[in-house]
Amino acid sequence: MRDTLEALEVGEIGVAEAESRLAGYATTGAGRGRFDAAREGRRGIPEAILADGKTPAEVAALTTTAVETTGRALVTRADADDTAAVRTAMEEFERGAEIDTAESPGATVDHDERTGTIVVHADDFERPELDATVAVVSAGTSDAAVAGEAAVVAREIGATVDRIDDVGVANLDRILDQRDRIREADVVVVAAGREGALPTVVAGLVAAPVIALPVSTGYGVGGEGVAALEGALQSCSVLTTVNVDAGFVAGAQAGLIARAVDAAGRD
């Protein structure tokens, strides 16, 4: 506590960052939410801002608070309106307009329309680097958006991400051609919709932990990810399963495993 107060006194940090250190979270203006600035230190996973269900103004306010307190913001399920609001907020951040921080460095805004993610880094932010690789494998092009969300999250945690796309079981040669590459990874996320067979196949080919990510592609009986989820839960190959379209959770879990691999290597 004393270190935080002394840093505040000499202007090394602003009030928002001091609040987040002391309380474990930071509040935004106009009642637009509380940001869990301490999550990464507590859990090893950066706090994400779910844009779905929030107004663009709320997303932008939380993004500004995230950058103020941690130097970074990660937004999921964002659309064009959310992105425009965030870019405007970051322009104000760069000008130092009404931003409660000791310094107001510029920030980069990276929006991936396909995955619906926004990643914001302050100019002086250094993303963690782990000596571990996460392979993110998708069965078909329709599964790429959810797989991409998982990849963004794992990368922000610090893992090296290897994307391997369009290797579904309709032609086993496609996945068999990539098995040596997948075997090099420390943890594997496999996104698949329809019947969701690919995670089970991959889990039978590799020694690394496999996380099944069911995707809501497919239609009719068992559609919208139901068959993919149930197939993963019934897998005869050993794997872990997250919920339908839960790219953030799959990426975060893979990132945590990557952190453990990195830590073991350092020991």
Image (cartoon, rainbow, N blue to C red):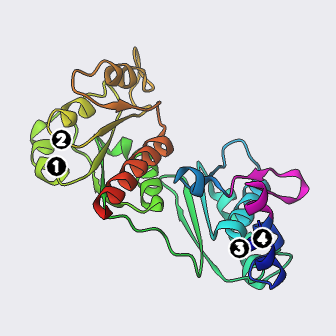
Please provide percent x and percent y for residue 213. 38, 36
Q: Give the number of the mark in front: 1 or 3.
A: 1
Q: Give the number of the mark in front: 4 or 3.
A: 4
Crowding near the residue tagged with mark 2, few <14, some 14–19, many ≥20 C-alpha atoms within 10 Å? some
Q: Which residues are magenta?
A: 19-37
Q: Give the number of the mark in front: 4 or 1.
A: 4
Crowding near the residue tagged with mark 3, few <14, some 14–19, many ≥20 C-alpha atoms within 10 Å? many
- Quadrant position of the C terminus in the picture: bottom left
- Residue at image coords 78%, 51%: 34
Identified by mark 1, the residue type is Arg
- Disc with the residue nearer the chain's start (1 vs 2): 1
Asked whether the viewer can see residue 88, the reply is: no
Identified by mark 4, the residue type is Arg
- Helix, strand or loop for disc 1: helix
Kindly check if marks 1 and 2 are in contact, taking CB atoms under 8 A apart as contact.
yes
- Disc with the residue nearer the chain's start (2 vs 3): 3
- Disc with the residue nearer the chain's start (4 vs 3): 4
- Disc with the residue nearer the chain's start (1 vs 3): 3
Residue labelled with disc 2: 207
Kindly check if marks 4 and 1 are in contact, taking CB atoms under 8 A apart as contact.
no
Identified by mark 3, the residue type is Met
Residue labelled with disc 3: 90
- Viewed as shown, does residue 170 lie left or right of 159? left
Give the spatial CA distance, label 1 vs label 2.
7 Å
Please provide percent x and percent y for residue 201. 19, 32
Identified by mark 2, the residue type is Ala
Residue labelled with disc 1: 183
- Disc with the residue nearer the chain's start (4 vs 1): 4
Please provide percent x and percent y for residue 207. 18, 41
**Depicted 162 relative to depicted 200: above or below:** below
